[in-house]
Image (cartoon, helix red, strand yellow):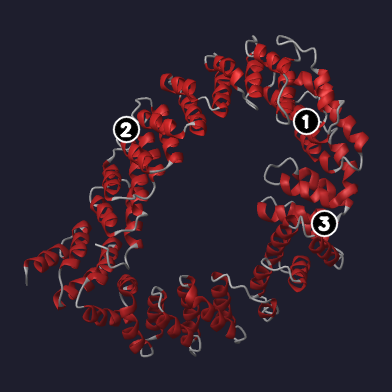
Amino acid sequence: MNEALAAVKWLLSQAEPEARRTAAQQLVKVDGAEAVAFLIQALGDDDWRVRREAALAAPLMGPRDYVIASLIPLLSDDENIGLRNATVEALSGIGADAIGPILDVLLSLSSDGKKLAIETLAGITDERSASALEALLENEDVNVACSAAEALAQVAKRSEDLRGDAIAALVRNVERADTYFRVALLEGLKLLEADLPWSVYAKVVGDPMLRRYAVSAAARMNDNEALDLLVATLARGPKALAREATIVLGEKVHAATNDPALVAYVHQAFSKFASVSTTILAFARAHDDLAVRAGAITLLGLLRDPATIPAIIGALSEEALADRAERALRLVGGGAIGPIMALAKSNEPSSRVSAISMMPSIVHSAKDEVRLTLHGALTDESNEVRATALRVLGSTGDADDMERIMPMVNDADPRVAAAAAAALAPLAKRFEERALELVTHADVEGPLASAACVVLAAVAEEHPLTRDRIRFLERAITSTDPRVRRLAVESLAVNPSDDVVDVLQLGLADEERDVQLAAIRALGRAGKGEPIEILILGARDGELVASGLSALSECDEERALAIAAKLVDSRDPLVACAAVDALGRAGGVSARTALLRGLEHPDGDVVRLALTELGIPESEVERERIGACLRNPSPSVRRAAVDSIGHERSRESRRIVRRRLDEESDPRVIEMILSVLAEGAGDSGVL
């Protein structure tokens, strides 16, 4: 026995699992009958990590024919389950060379042995394994046939070339009598996402145990027969299937915005079942299942039953269901007007918000009533109600509404002020002449200054501003109100010209960050990179640096890249992160070279972000530099490094992460390393 074999033998005899795991790793360095005996010993070890290492080593050992011949009998071992499972993993890793020997003995194995052989074939993507599994679908032992169906689907899932024949073989057997076998066939078809005609699933609708597969298939179909099954299952089926049908039908109806024929058909199908609204209403109140509630809320709208409208409106106040409830109320149509208007007068602010949010869908049916309600909501005690009313007026209001909205751009509540500005802008575009008339006499220190800036920004999007209007905005940049200064900068940024650049630069020195950010964006749009560069290099604010680099890249990408490369080394983590982010967006060789310096930053957040932006290494140098991060003190950095280098899937990358495995202490990092090694277990390059 040579020294390598002796070392393996000694290590396998140790009580410490780590020593035995090391022995399993060393098996790749030895060959011959004695080595295979040690391989089998390691495959049956008490510790799963030892068994895993042995399974990874088996494909790299020789002589290969002898290894295979020695492993196949282990499939019939009735005593050591760990040994059998590890053997399956080892033979699957060996791959195509194991198929022939397995097929030679398959029919002579015990029932359990056959299932393990089938499980082995399931791990090998090859035409011969697929053909053998197809033949086993005819086996008289239903357990064997079921295993073959599951395995065939797994093999075909990994190969588009095998998928068609596998689907055909599974479908051919669907009419077989045994229910459990048909379950396995249908599960296989589901795994393969087989696009089959409804006629295949119609064969199993009558079997209570199989109907759920037809319901699941109906989710992918809009055939009338499939829709009829879903409706009937919801109305009369077992509760579990009725819940699933509710989810599927609700999703179909919710998504059928441009398919009124489908909505009309489902509505008509429901009319055949007198008590279906009671069932759906019960599901809408099933607080243990959000998915079934969402489906039920949509279907309540389809039923258009006045008794169910309160339940729909109640769902408007739940963030997860609000979208479904709005769609349901649109399906209800005119019948929802009364309940919505009543809800707008509720004592609960959240209910008033929900009702106001729905008003665009009923404005054409009750315009005057809606307008009066919205106008009243502008003085509501709840800021959220006021903001919601403003958002609705932005899309449904008219010229007269602008006079109500303009003072609210100065509201003390930031949400209300922002909503007022957002509502005023589209109205100013639609009613430009009236909007300009309302702000004609605005003063930069007066109550309409902010509104005037919003109006002029909206006008500037349509055509250039006159010199008088530009002068107003230039004066507004010196206002004592920071909100006016920011809005003035944003207005000038819409169509920036050379003659306002000096004015915009004033914003860079403003004491308010929002004004500075607006000025940065404006200068970037104007193509003026020099003042932005000066600001960036002197900034100690990550947000300003990030915004500056983004704006600078719009007008001078090369300059932005050069500055970002300098700032990667900044001691300020926020500034360094902003630089890394800019380099990642820029891409290219020079950007990646600068990102490598980010891997040496003392702050873990910077290193982790640099690893994310680099992604998969593109050269040997990058691989080594990323690999060095596996020694970083931060576990999160080490996880990011494993993720980056592991996705390269090369022999060298796996060698790097394997070296780290013996030193790593963080369980999550260890798990990621083992996952990387396992993914390459069947490749000839695994070490």
Q: Secondary structure at mark 2?
A: loop
Q: What's under tag 3, amino acid-wise?
A: Leu
Q: What's under tag 1, amino acid-wise?
A: Lys
Sequence-wise, which precedes: disc 2 or disc 1? 1
Count of numbered tags: 3
* Image quarter in which the N terminus is found: bottom left
Q: Is residue 587 left or right of residue 394?
A: left
Q: Is residue 664 left or right of residue 216?
A: left
- For marks 1 and 3, give the one nearer the viewer: 1
Q: Nearer the viewer, residue 319 or 235?
A: 319
**Residue 392 visible in the shown view:** yes
Residue named by callout 1? 429
Provide residue 583's location: percent of width, then percent of height.
42, 37
**Relative vertical location of residue 678 with respect to residue 171 in this rendering, above or below:** above
* Image quarter in which the C terminus is found: bottom left
Residue named by callout 2? 601
Q: Secondary structure at mark 1?
A: helix
